[in-house]
Image (cartoon, grey):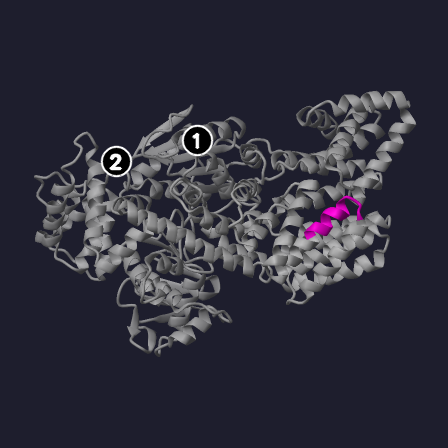
């Protein structure tokens, strides 16, 4: 969409297209991505009605999207801008109807720096493997913070005095909103970053650290997640927010203590309904917003003196557009706020009801329903009872279709789309009708919308989801969970079909957000009340989502579980995909992977797509190549390539071509290998597959290495690493390419250039649980030790690596072979056969941890 040097002003808003900023009263208003494009399109065409088809082409050029996305974005803009701005002309489209003036685009809201509450900066060490690549981002609140200036100042003061501050308060009291405001203030100071880890959707304590790692933007693979997080933060200064800890108290406390013990520049701000009771914790108890005493005389002019009534009036204006309460209204408003105990969530849920009833009716209904709902357990806190009543009342006031949809949505553990909601609801009238219901629920603040991604996604507030789920019968809950699993089967079947043909970035944006729902669906399917057959089918479609997110431990766990449940009734295509998932890049290599590939190929011959069979065949051939059995690999590669060339160019073909290139290189046919790699590189670039580009360039580097062109090998391997996105730079498959650079430098005799690379790669490989990369880096350090005269250390490291290699039974890469050959030559020149045998036997008897510790002594030398 063309940008202009002008700015547009309407009401309190100022729209600056070239800076992509919407501001109001000197503050930037959070509107991004497609929502900003839609607003600009309407403003620029304000002289006419803009048809829906034209808007969709302007906002999503060249893409096929559901009309429901446009409906939801318009609803979001109306919620943000208020009424009387965007008009709908039934059957025609939309028109921007607010008066607009144009002016030069200079100026705009400027953030004001604030004193930093962080600890003094530490002396910075080089960033370790897995370090956070940039400062991260925080969720952007859509409303201003009301009545919390004092709390914000006190939290900032606490953070300057303590490394761990927990905001404690009742559900719905505004803990998250306050934490975000505090984090934003710190981010605007001299901090290096602020990171937000949402623990609300997390149900397993063991996933707390993995969630923190995801918030930091680091990948943990199958390694020690805590050590990855600590390594990423050790040299940083910034704030880590742990939001929604109440159901994971012990795990959150353990994580906070472990991080703070090793990361002196980090402070942690947690939110929870209970204290974490962690060492050094400082509490800030967040109370409800102040309302007047029951006997106070209230007039309209005094409403702004009390944060609770100020918040109510603002939310009422957002819902109604025009809302000017009189003195009689003010008394009703204060009684409502008193009845709601000043809890922000309760107020925000109640105020939009004024679209359907008067203030007096609202107050009467609240009193009537709350009397019924608070007649339960008297030992519970009043705020907790009131929040339950508020949400219960909110559900009661919905229409039958809205209420039925909301209750079904409580089955989701994470975010969801209009399509998945329609499937769960079993809505006969289709997705368009569900989009309308969702827009209504968003307007009532019962559903939160995220419009920043490729497609609109939604979530229920945790408390809303909890209370809604309580209203489902056991049968309804079971049906909902079954429908969720069925939806996930459809979604990930589509994901696997898309994977060979679309870019990494687009694929992850479309399918990664379902990961929390996937975990919940699999846990139900394989649980005591689940459907094991549905679990097998779902698991079989998830190889790439686990692999693309570097969740290798979960891939192995779920696939091993599913494979253990295969029987004669399992369809061959499902069983084939399960076995295929256990012989990929992240699977163990050798006999186990070869057996899995053979099983997959046999099953796909009975029932499976050409691409599935081709993938199984090249993976089977790859295991033979690694073992040096080219005679067995050749026919498999021939068949796999024929099958995959029979389809349109795909990532599967790219992988097969890389395997074919490795075959030719091992067969001493470098020109044939180069031709295959050049074709693979062309296809992967056309598919915008950054991972495949990097892996193919890595294979080209090995081609140069095999020919002795180490300078060219280093340059191409570095080009491979530079082609990756920051998020991909720490994936497990990247470690091999990065380590190869060190091998090539060692082959040139550049110890000073290789040593820091090896130290970083060894630490990363150990943290990520990649034993073959650990061994490769130990062997590189063994060569350095031998050249520098530490022969006893070199001999022990050599023996350990030889033992590991014997167990794996596969060929070394050309770079690793060059290192091995030179190491063996140096050891044989400087040690007697008896000395070398004794030292090697000693190293072979030691474990990985002891050998890594000894290797790091060599790595840390200046």
Helix, strand or loop status at disc 2: loop
User: Does residue 142 show up magenta in the picture?
Assistant: no
Q: Residue at x 37, y 49 (%)?
A: 481
User: Quick check: 465 above or below 326?
Assistant: above
Cα–Cα gap, marks 2 and 1: 26 Å
**Mark number displayed over residue 251:** 1
Q: Which residue is mark 2?
A: 287
Apparent side of residue 326 relative to residue 701 in the rendered image (left or right): left
In front of the other: 753 or 593: 593
Query: Where residue 598 sits in the image (x, y, percent)?
Result: 67, 49
Query: Where residue 727 sits in the image (x, y, percent)?
Result: 58, 48
Near mark 2 (Cα within 10 A), the count class, few <14, some 14-19 or many ≥20, is some
Assign the magenta stretch its main secondary structure: helix
Are the two marked residues, 2 and 1, in contact with CB atoms closer than 8 angstroms? no
Visible residue check, residue 303: yes
User: Quick check: 737 above or below 116?
Assistant: below
Q: Quadrant of the C terminus?
A: top right
Near mark 1 (Cα within 10 A), the count class, few <14, some 14-19 or many ≥20, is some
Magenta segment boundaries in residue numbering:
619-629
- Sequence-wise, which precedes: disc 2 or disc 1? 1
Q: Residue at x 76, y 41 (%)?
A: 810
In front of the other: 804 or 212: 804
Query: Where residue 815 sits in the image (x, y, percent)?
Result: 79, 43
Visible residue check, residue 118: no
Apparent side of residue 176 relative to residue 206 in the rendered image (left or right): left
Q: How many marks?
A: 2
Helix, strand or loop status at disc 1: helix
Return the residue found at the far front.
568
In front of the other: 111 or 68: 68
């Amino acid at each position: 969409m063309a940008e202009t040097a002008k700015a547009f002003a309407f009401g309190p808003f100022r729209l600056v297209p070239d800076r992509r900023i919407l501001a109001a009263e000197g503050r930037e208003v959070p509107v991004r991505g497609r929502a900003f494009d839609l607003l600009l399109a309407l403003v620029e065409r304000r002289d006419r009605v803009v048809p829906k088809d034209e808007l969709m082409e302007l906002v999503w050029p060249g893409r096929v999207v559901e009309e429901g996305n446009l409906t939801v974005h318009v609803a979001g803009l109306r919620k943000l801008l208020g009424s009387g701005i965007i008009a709908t002309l039934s059957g025609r489209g939309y028109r921007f109807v607010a008066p607009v003036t144009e002016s030069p685009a200079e100026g705009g809201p400027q953030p004001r720096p604030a004193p930093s509450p962080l600890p003094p900066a530490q002396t910075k060490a080089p960033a370790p493997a897995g370090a956070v690549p940039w400062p991260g981002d925080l969720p952007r609140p859509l409303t201003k913070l009301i009545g919390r200036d004092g709390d914000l100042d006190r939290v900032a003061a606490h953070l300057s005095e303590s490394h761990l501050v927990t905001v404690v308060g009742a559900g719905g009291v505004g803990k998250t909103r306050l934490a975000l405001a505090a984090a934003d203030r710190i981010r605007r100071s001299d901090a290096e970053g602020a990171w937000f880890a949402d623990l609300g959707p997390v149900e397993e304590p063991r996933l707390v650290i993995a969630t923190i790692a995801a918030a930091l933007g680091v990948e943990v693979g199958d390694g020690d997640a805590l050590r990855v997080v600590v390594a990423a933060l050790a040299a940083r200064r910034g704030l880590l927010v742990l939001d929604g800890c109440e159901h994971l108290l012990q795990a959150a406390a353990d994580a906070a203590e472990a991080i703070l013990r090793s990361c002196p520049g980090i402070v942690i701000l947690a939110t929870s309904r209970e204290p974490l009771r962690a060492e050094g914790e400082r509490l800030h108890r967040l109370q409800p917003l102040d309302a007047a005493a029951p006997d106070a005389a209230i007039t309209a002019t005094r409403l702004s003196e009390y944060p609770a009534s100020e918040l109510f009036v603002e939310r009422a204006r957002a819902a109604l557009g025009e809302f000017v309460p009189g003195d009689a209204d003010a008394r009703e408003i204060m009684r409502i706020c008193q009845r709601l105990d000043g809890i922000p969530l309760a107020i925000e849920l109640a105020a939009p009801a004024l679209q359907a009833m008067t203030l007096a009716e609202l107050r009467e209904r609240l009193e009537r329903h709350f009397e019924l709902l608070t007649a339960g357990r008297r030992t519970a806190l009043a705020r907790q009872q009131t929040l339950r009543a508020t949400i219960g009342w909110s559900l009661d006031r919905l229409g039958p279709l809205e209420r039925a949809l909301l209750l079904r949505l409580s089955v989701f553990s994470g975010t969801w789309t209009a399509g998945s909601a329609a499937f769960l609801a079993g809505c006969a009238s289709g997705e368009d009708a569900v989009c309308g219901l969702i827009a209504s629920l968003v307007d009532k603040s019962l559903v939160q919308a995220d419009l920043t991604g490729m497609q609109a996604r939604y979530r229920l507030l945790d408390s809303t989801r909890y209370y809604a789920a309580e209203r489902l019968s056991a049968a309804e809950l079971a049906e909902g969970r079954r429908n969720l699993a069925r939806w996930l089967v459809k979604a990930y079947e589509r994901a696997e079909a898309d994977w060979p043909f679309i870019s990494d970035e687009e694929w992850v944006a479309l399918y990664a957000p379902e990961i929390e729902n996937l975990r919940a669906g699999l846990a139900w399917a394989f649980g005591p009340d689940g459907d094991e057959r549905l679990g097998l089918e779902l698991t079989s479609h998830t190889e790439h989502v686990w692999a693309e997110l570097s969740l290798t431990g979960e891939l192995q766990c779920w696939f091993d579980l599913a494979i253990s449940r295969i029987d004669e009734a399992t369809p061959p295509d499902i069983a084939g995909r399960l076995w295929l998932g256990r012989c990929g890049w992240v699977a163990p290599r050798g006999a186990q992977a070869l057996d899995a590939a053979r099983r997959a190929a046999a099953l796909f011959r009975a029932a499976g797509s050409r691409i599935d069979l081709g993938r199984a065949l090249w993976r089977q051939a790859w295991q033979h190549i690694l073992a040096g059995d080219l005679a067995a690999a050749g026919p498999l590669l021939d068949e796999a390539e024929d099958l995959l060339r029979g389809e349109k160019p795909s990532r599967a073909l790219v992988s097969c071509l890389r395997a074919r290139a490795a075959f030719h290189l091992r067969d001493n046919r470098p020109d044939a290998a180069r031709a295959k790699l050049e074709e693979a590189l062309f296809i992967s670039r056309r598919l915008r597959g950054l991972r495949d580009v990097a892996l193919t360039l890595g294979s080209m580097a090995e081609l140069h290495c095999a020919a002795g062109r180490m300078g060219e090998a280093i340059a191409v391997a570095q080009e491979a690493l530079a082609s990756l996105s920051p998020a991909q730079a720490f994936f497990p498959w990247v470690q091999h390419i990065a380590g190869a650079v060190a091998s090539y430098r060692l082959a040139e005799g550049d110890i000073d250039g290789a040593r820091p690379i090896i130290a970083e790669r060894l630490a990363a490989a150990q943290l990520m649980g990649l034993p073959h990369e650990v061994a490769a880096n130990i062997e590189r350090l063994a060569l350095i030790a031998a050249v520098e005269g530490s022969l006893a250390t070199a001999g022990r490291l050599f023996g350990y690596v030889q033992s590991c290699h014997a167990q794996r039974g596969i060929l070394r890469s050309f770079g690793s072979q060059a290192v091995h050959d030179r190491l063996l030559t140096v050891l044989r020149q400087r040690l007697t056969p008896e000395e070398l045998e004794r030292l090697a036997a000693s190293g072979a008897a030691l474990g990985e941890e002891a050998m890594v510790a000894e290797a790091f002594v060599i790595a840390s030398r200046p």
